[in-house]
Amino acid sequence: MKAYILLNTELEKESEVVKELKGVMEIKNIFIVYGIYDIIVEVEAETMDKVKEIVFNKIRRLNIVKSTITLIAYDEPIPNT
């Protein structure tokens, strides 16, 4: 199962969040982005419960994370060819 978590952080705290999340095994990629959200995290886990555990216990527990939105991918990536 693959999920993308969109995060809003405290002002100018993106680097701190990235540092905290780097050691989480299920997090495959972390992107600092411009726009409405500050960070996008790509998570791979075996079950929905594991995704929920990562979001609640590893991401949302950080005081500098203001809000999250979780997007669950329901299929494999679509090739761009």
Image (cartoon, rainbow, N blue to C red):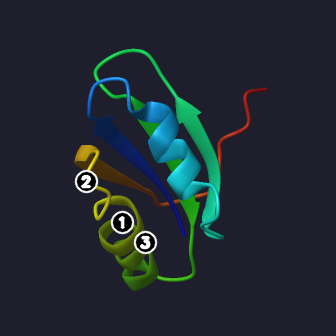
Q: Residue 40 at what x, y percent from top left?
A: 47, 39
Toward the viewer: 18 or 40?
A: 18
Label 2 CA crowd tier, 10 Å (few <14, some 14–19, many 20+): few
Q: How far apart are marks 1 and 3 (CA)?
A: 4 Å
Amino acid type of the residue that numbered disc 2 sits on in the rendered structure: Asn
Q: Is residue 14 above or below residue 19?
A: above
Helix, strand, or loop for circle 2?
loop
Circle 3 residues within 10 Å: few <14, some 14–19, many ≥20: some
Q: Mark 1 points at which residue?
A: 55
Seen from this angle, which residue lies furthest left?
66
Q: Where is residue 74 in the image (x, y as percent from the top left)?
A: 47, 60
Quarter of the image for the C terminus: give it: top right
Residue 54 disc label: 3
Residue type pointed to by label 3:
Ile
| The quadrant where residue 80 appears | top right
Between residue 25 and residue 63, name the one nearer to us.
63
Residue 36 position in % (x across, y down)? 28, 21
Q: How far apart are marks 2 and 3 (CA)?
A: 15 Å
